[in-house]
Each structure stands twice: as structure tokens, then as C-alpha cells.
Amino acid sequence: MKKFFIFIILFVLVLTSCGTGGSRKPAAKLGTSMEKTYQVKLITVDPGHFHAALVQKTMYAQVSPDVHVYAPQGPDYLQHLERIKAYNERPLNPTNWNEIAYTGPDFFEKMLSDKAGNVVILSGNNRKKAEYITKSINAGLNVLADKPMIISPEDFPVLEAAFKTAGEKGVLLYDIMTERYEVTTILQKLLSQNTRIFGVLINGSKEEPAVTKISVHHFSKVVSGSHVLRPAWYFDVQQQGEGIVDVTTHLVDLIQWECFPEQILNPSDIKMVNAKRWPTLISQEEFKGVTGLDDFPGYLEKDVKDGKLNVFANGEMVYQVKGIFAKVSVEWKYQAPPGGGDTHYSVMHGTKCDLVIHQGVEEKFLPTLYVKSINGIKMNKFASELREAVKALPYDSLQIEAVNTSTFKIIVPEKYRVSHEEHFGQVTAKFLEYLKAGKLPEWEVPGMITKYFTTTSALKLANGK
């Protein structure tokens, strides 16, 4: 496998002529792209995660096909180029990206001096995110960053300062919250705002929170038709971040987005109740299966016990947002069961019903929204009111189906089912709208600051600090 990587590296070196700092000469199609003036030009920096490529799985009318990539030479960079190439060469709706690469050791400084675009895409080693964000913003560049923006409490004031600078310079700093575009989550949010059906969100308690979100992910997975080959650093929580500050970013965001829609939140609205963390054990064989490496690198030896790698990818927190109790939990396993994948569970408890999303075996691992009547409301009346509420939603052809004497399932037509990969294009399209307007909604920046205060506070508490 190591020989394979060496071969690939040499092959791409020949193609790109990057050497110790050169950039690929513009391809023939570059001349075509220059015939039009584009509002947005992307700069991809150090793309260590496949999410960087997913931003480019589709094309956008206002975005130049020419994308400048600044990265260190190595497998992460090579895999990124291969993913973009696959999008360009797919038979159905191929893209037309022209990647212009620079892989010198001064790649980041070169990016700042070149300013070859106006939007920096960040998706990679999270330990470097705070620095990349800060320097990009200081240079007057907009930033679209994969989650999480930060992974340590020490970086929280750095992120706050970056948002302040972005406001002063008139540039946008935004994170990629794909889960807001999952149709069942949107429906859960909309129905929770219907007081006739849902009533109002209860306050809940430490033992029985008003809202709970649980996410299960897997290290071994297939993306865009290929098995993901993860970098070794992905298993180092000092570089990727612990689970309690990683995937939880999405879940905390959804709680704010659903329970307090378009409301300005601040760190003072958050009260952490408890938090905990625990490891996923990865064998050397499993590690090889998802990284291609025969051995654990030296920087992971600190986490190896009895021959297995202890990855603190799991975490749970219970906290209050403006007095509402919420619970967030994330767990990482090595591989999903046959036919399965990452799963999401979510419940919002109202005074009239519970809105529950399941994504298990019974749902064939497809997110499914259930509405459970409570407090002895007559089912005939509840069914009639729910049917009217569903008809009023901005989706046609939604149906309800009785599951038992108290629960209905919302049947969502296939046309509204959008994959997780496609969500990246939706987030990017929304960001481009904000970019054109020159600003984010007034609640977004306070919401992001509050979100990262929540995740980093949970990590501090889980570590007993």
C-alpha cells in the first residue's frame, strides 16, 4: 500500500509539475472560463477531508470553474484531485472544474499573497482551522469552513476575534451545516412551530430533556461510490478533535435552529449540566482497512493500549438553552451493518405531541419522521388536524400513515429525498446568496459563536475542567 501511495505521488507530480512550489499550468479549458467574469472564485486550502470535494460535486453559475488549490504534497491532496476528476468525468451531469495546484512548503503563505480568489474553502485537519480562518479573514478573504471550526476551548476566543474582524472587513465567515437541509429535519422544525399540533416545546429536565439528538457514524464508509481512505491524523483527537466537539457541532446547531428559529443567541444563554466522553477501540487491522497503513504512526502511540487504538470519538452533553433542557450524543463505530449507514435520532417534546425522527432498521436506514400524540387527545381529531397541518407545509404530496393508536408516520415523496452529499451543494448555494447580499442573517454569527461555546464548554466539563 505504501508503494502504491509513492507511485501515485510520483504520477501526480509529473502531471502537475508542482515540485517544491510550482503550480500547474492552466489547462486548455481555462481560456474558456476566462471569457466570462465570475463573481466568485474558490480557493481550496489543505483539503484533508472529502467534504472539501463535495462542495464541488455540482457547479454554480456565479462561480468560476478555475479553482486554485494550495496544499502540501501527499495523499490528502492527491485524493482531493482524484475526487474532482471523478466529478468531471462522470457520465451524468459532469462538472467542468479546472484545478490549479500549488504544493510548495509555503502553500498557505502563497495563498495569502496570491489572493487568486475570494472564497476560501476549508475542510481538513481541524487543529489548523483556527489559524487558517484567522489569517484568511485578516487577508480580506471570505471563508466557507467545514465543521468544526475549532476543537479546543483555547481556540474559542480566537474564533470570536475572527468573527469580529470579518464584520469589520465586510467579509463572511460561515460553517457548512448540511443537516439543516435534511427534509425530515425541516419538517420536524416546521411542525414544531404549529401550536395546534405541537403545542409548545416543554422545558424538560436533566433526566428527560425537551429535545434530544443522537448521531451514530462510522469510520469505514463509501462516498461518491468509493471507499473513503481516511488520513491517519483523522484518528488523532488532537488533530481531528474529540467527538464531543466534532459531529456534535451539527446537533447543537440543529437544536438552536429548530427550537429558537432566527433568534439571536449568546453564550450567556447556555448552561452546561453534564458531559462525558469515551473511546472507540480500533484494531491495527481495522486501522489499515481505512487508512491503508500497516502500522499506527508515532503520534498515535499515546492512544494505543493493549494493541488497540483508543479514539475518543464519542461524547454526550446535557445542557440548557434559555432554560430548555437539551441532550446531544455522538458515537463512532468502525463499520455500519449491511445495508446501513450513519444514523440520526431526534425527538422534540411538545405539550401536545412528540416529533421523532428514527433512522434504524425498521426505516431501512432512511430518516423518517413520526408524530406521536400525547395527553389522551382523541386520534380521529388529532389525525384530522395533523392532515391539515401537513397540507399547509411547503411540500406537496406529503401523506400521513397510522403506525399505532397514538403515532403517525409522515410519508415523504422520493423527489424530496436529497442525499447527504448533495446537501453540500445546497449549503454552498445558500452561502453564495449571502455573499451576493454582502451579509449573513443577523442571527447566524451570534448562533455560530454560541454553538462553539457550547461544544468547547462540553469538552472542558467532560475532561473535568
Image (tube, grey):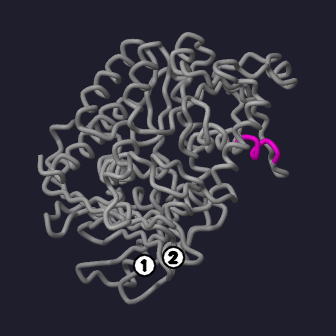
Look at the picture and state if 131 lies above or below 412: above
Residue 69 appears left or right of 98? left
* Residue range highlighted in magenta: 84-89
Q: Nearer the viewer, residue 341 or 199?
A: 341
Q: Are marks 2 and 1 in contact (CB under 8 Å)?
A: yes
Secondary element under disc 2, as helix, strand or loop, is: strand
Tell me residue 404's x, y (percent): 41, 89
**In which quarter of the view is residue 197 placed?**
bottom left
Q: Which amino acid lies under the numbered mark 2 shown in the image of this protein?
A: Ile
Residue 250 visible at all: no
Look at the picture and state if 59 lies above or below 404: above
| Residue tagged 1 | 383
Tell me residue 173's x, y (percent): 43, 27
Q: Which amino acid lies under the numbered mark 1 shown in the image of this protein?
A: Ala
Q: Quadrant of the N terminus?
A: bottom right
Q: Nearer the viewer, residue 215 or 230?
A: 230
Q: Is residue 85 magenta?
A: yes
Tell me residue 465's x, y (percent): 12, 46
Residue 173 appears left or right of 117? left
Say few, some or many: other residues with alpha carbon within 10 Å of mark 2 (under 14 / 14 to 19 / 20 or more). some
Mark 2 or 1, closer to the camera: 2
| Residue tagged 2 | 400
Residue 34 visible at all: yes
Q: What kind of secondary structure does the magenta stretch mostly adopt?
A: helix
Tell me residue 42's x, y (percent): 62, 26
| C-alpha distance separating marks 2 and 1 | 8 Å
Secondary element under disc 1, as helix, strand or loop, is: helix
Look at the picture and state if 245 lies above or below 60: below
**In which quarter of the view is residue 70 placed?**
top right
